[in-house]
Amino acid sequence: YEKIKMSYSMKMTNSVNTKENEIFTRETLDKMKNGIQHTIPVSTSLSLFNYINVSPSFNYTERWYFKKVEQQWNNDTKQVETLDPEYGFWRLYNYNASVSANTTIYGTYTAKKKHRKLQAVRHTLTPNIGVSYAPDFSRQMYGFYETVQTDTTGRFKVYSPFTDNAYGVPGSGQQFNINFGLSQSLEAKVRTKDTVKKVKIIDQLSITGSYNFLADSMRLSTLPIQ
């Protein structure tokens, strides 16, 4: 338990973009983006077989909002209308859990003849793999998203009435990801006239990616190489 780390942070904001002659009007109040956000990350680290580092973590975020803006379908105009802001108090929260593992693998080549200019080459590989999960916070049970009719054919869209607030809304779509990556470096020891110096051939070349088992499509992310 001594390795468990937990912290708490809170921030609040209130901002608005308006014209000078509208500062003390209802329009300015309706344009305000404000809110209070609480963040609680919990993590720990364990050593497996003395060579593998395992890091479980849990993150909780809660937002307090004081305004929501709903939409409705107007049968007369055949359009989606944005209603006047409704003021009150609403709690929006989201959380996710993950566990990752990484280790370091070394490979070394040493020249047999010490008088050679190339003395040694060292290759370092750092693979990592992890699993992360986050629920679908657009589900009706949470109340963070709503549906509204969008056309005369009866089609609907999902939206959040809290989008215009300061810290956004919890993400939609359930996620169960496998995250993976590999970074490597390659350096050599080269003999010069007076001494032996290290020369970096590859300096932290890495590739990362993820695969979401629960996505409808495009489950594999892009694989950037840096």
Image (cartoon, grey):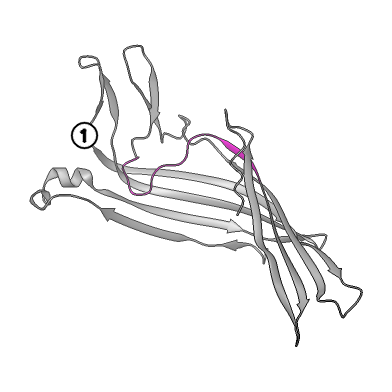
Residue at the spot 40% in from the left edge and 32% down from the top edge: 145
- Where residue 51 appears, x then y in whole percent? 80, 62
Q: Quadrant of the C terminus?
A: bottom right
User: Looking at the picture, which amino acid does disc 1 mark?
Assistant: Asp
- Where residue 68 appears, x then y in whole percent? 30, 38
50 to the left or right of 78: right
Q: Which residue is mark 1?
A: 84
> Which image quadrant for residue 212?
top right
Name, please, the residue furthest toward the right: 112
The magenta segment is 163-179
> Which image quadrant for residue 177?
top right
Q: Quadrant of the N terminus?
A: bottom right
In the image, 53 versus 10, the foreground residue is 53
Image: 82 above or below 67: above
Name, please, the residue furthest toward the bottom: 194
Residue at the spot 72% in from the left edge and 75% down from the top edge: 198
180 to the left or right of 30: right
- Where residue 116 appears, x then y in whole percent? 85, 77
